[in-house]
Image (spheres, rainbow, N blue to C red):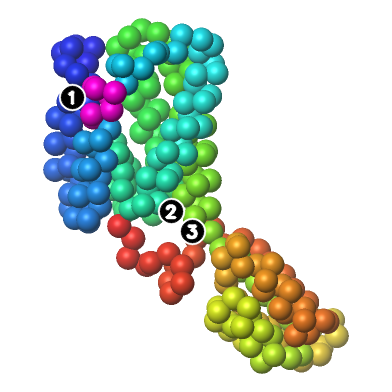
Amino acid sequence: NHFTSLPIGLLTICLNIPIVLLSIRFLSKSFFLKSLKSMLFIAIFIDVVFPLLPSYHGNELLAAIFTGILTGAGLGFIYMRGSSTGGSDFLIFSAKKLWPQLSIGEITLVMDGIIILVGAFVFRKVDAALYGGIMTALETTVLDKIVSGSVMGKLTYIVTNFPQKVVDAIDLSTERGATVFECKGGYSKVEKNMVMCVCAKSEIVRLRRAVTAADPKAFIMVTDCAETFGLGFQPTNEQ
C-alpha cells in the first residue's frame, strides 16, 4: 500500500494468491473455502467499512495493548472454527504441519516479528516497530491461551480399592470412559487399583464429586492435558 497506493483490502486478496499456491498442498480444501469467506469479509471491512469510522489518535501504547489483546482473541475464535483470515495465516498453519511441536502463537510471533522488522526498515520508525512488538507479544499470548484452552482437558488419576464403582460413577456423572491399572504402594506395599480418566474442564467438578461419593477414601490427582485428541475431544485429523 505504501508503494502502490492500492486499497489495502484489495491488495491483501492479490497478495494471498501466491501464498495460497505455496500452502495448498499442506492444508485441506474445507479450510481454504472457510478462509476465503473470511478474507472477503475482511477486505470489504478494510476498504469500505473502516474508512467510515473515526480513527484513534490517543495513546499509542494503549492502542498497541488493546489491539494485541483483541486481535489475539479474534484470531483465536476464528481458528477454533476451522478457518483463518488468509495471508500469513496460511503460512502459519503450513508451518504448524511441518513443525507440530510449535504452538500457533509461537509461529505467529516469529512471522509477525519478521514483518515488523521489515516495516521498521521501510518506514524508518523505530517506535512503531517497538509498539508492534508489544502488540504481537500480547496477540500471540492471548491466541495461544484461547486455542490451547479449547482443546485442553483434565487428566485424573484415582487410586482406589473399588475401581468398578469409581468407573461406573464416572460414566454416570460425565459419560466418560476410564482405564483401570493395577498398582502397589511404594511404602505400604499394598495392592490397589488406579483409574485414569480424561474429561473436559467443565466436567472435573462433577467427576470429583462422583468419585468421592463412590469411594470417600479414594486418592485423587488432577492435572492439565495441554491437548486432547480422540473420541469426545479434538478430532485427530486436524485441518
Q: Quadrant of the N terminus?
A: top left
Work out whether 212 lies above or below 140.
Answer: below
Which residue is the site of mark 2?
Answer: 101
Q: Is residue 47 magenta?
A: yes
Which residue is the site of mark 1?
Answer: 11
State the residue at coordinates (19%, 19%): 7
The answer to whether one can see residue 105 in this image is no
Which residue is the site of mark 3?
Answer: 151
Residue 169: image x %, image y %?
A: 66, 84
Q: Which residues are magenta?
A: 43-49
Amino acid type for the residue under numbered disc 3: Val
Q: Quadrant of residue 124?
A: top left
Work out whether 181 lies above or below 61.
Answer: below
Q: Secondary structure at mark 1?
A: helix
Left-right relation of 25 to 152: left
Work out whether 62 lies above or below 222.
Answer: above
Foreground: disc 2 or disc 3: 3
Left-right relation of 23 to 51: left
Q: Nearer the viewer, residue 87 or 214?
A: 214
The answer to whether one can see residue 120 in this image is yes
Left-right relation of 140 to 169: left
Amino acid type for the residue under numbered disc 2: Gln
Name which of mark 1 and mark 2 comes first in the sequence.
Answer: 1
Q: Nearer the viewer, residue 133 or 135?
A: 135
